[in-house]
Image: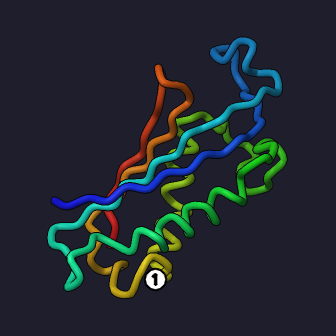
Amino acid sequence: MYSLAVSDHIMIAHSFTGEIFGPAQKLHGATYGVEVEFRREQLDANGLVCDIGLALTVLHEVLADLNFKNLDELPELRGHNTTTEFMAGEIFRRMKTQIEAGRIGPGTANTLASMRVVLRESPLAWAAFEGLLG
């Protein structure tokens, strides 16, 4: 399996519901390093997994909708604990929509096998969501 990864980062604010979160129940900030890895069985005719420039652009655009935002105020995230794990899945879903629209290269939607999104909360802790594409 071949893979290509791109990365960016976001700064967000949010709060959590539930005693398990202790002081994180209050509004607090987080900076996430975000990595997206695309995988496919065979390289395309140009020897690529996907267009790295387009992948970087699309990731930046997807993250722009979250960057410097209070996630508690975004209607599509209301009612969810926007944990690192949850946000890895959310970014996966948003990226998948862009892939299906052909935004990271022609034919890519039909040839990418899977994608993995990693959110790094610190050098010591991170979460990921991985799923099939196509």
Nearest to the observer: residue 62 or residue 86: 62
The residue located at (50%, 49%) in the rendering is 89
Quadrant of res 108: bottom left
Q: How was the colour assigned to the protein in this rendering?
A: rainbow
Q: Helix, strand or loop at disc 1? A: loop
The residue located at (64%, 56%) in the rendering is 63
Residue 126 as seen in the image, left or right of residue 11:
left
Q: Provide residue 22's location: percent of width, then percent of height.
A: 70, 12
Q: Provide residue 74's location: percent of width, then percent of height.
A: 79, 52
Residue 64 as seen in the image, left or right of residue 115:
right
Q: Provide residue 2's location: percent of width, then percent of height.
A: 20, 61
Q: Provide residue 33's location: percent of width, then percent of height.
A: 55, 40
Residue 42 as seen in the image, left or right of residue 93:
left
Using the image, determine if residue 101 lies above or below residue 39.
Answer: below
Quadrant of res 118: top left
In the rendered image, which residue does mark 1 sit on? 102
User: In the picture, which quadrant includes the N terminus?
Assistant: bottom left
User: In the picture, which quadrant includes the C terminus?
Assistant: bottom left
Nearest to the observer: residue 57 or residue 66: 57
The residue located at (28%, 70%) in the rendering is 49
The residue located at (45%, 78%) in the rendering is 100
Using the image, determine if residue 66 lies above or below residue 109.
Answer: above
Mark 1 residue type: Gly
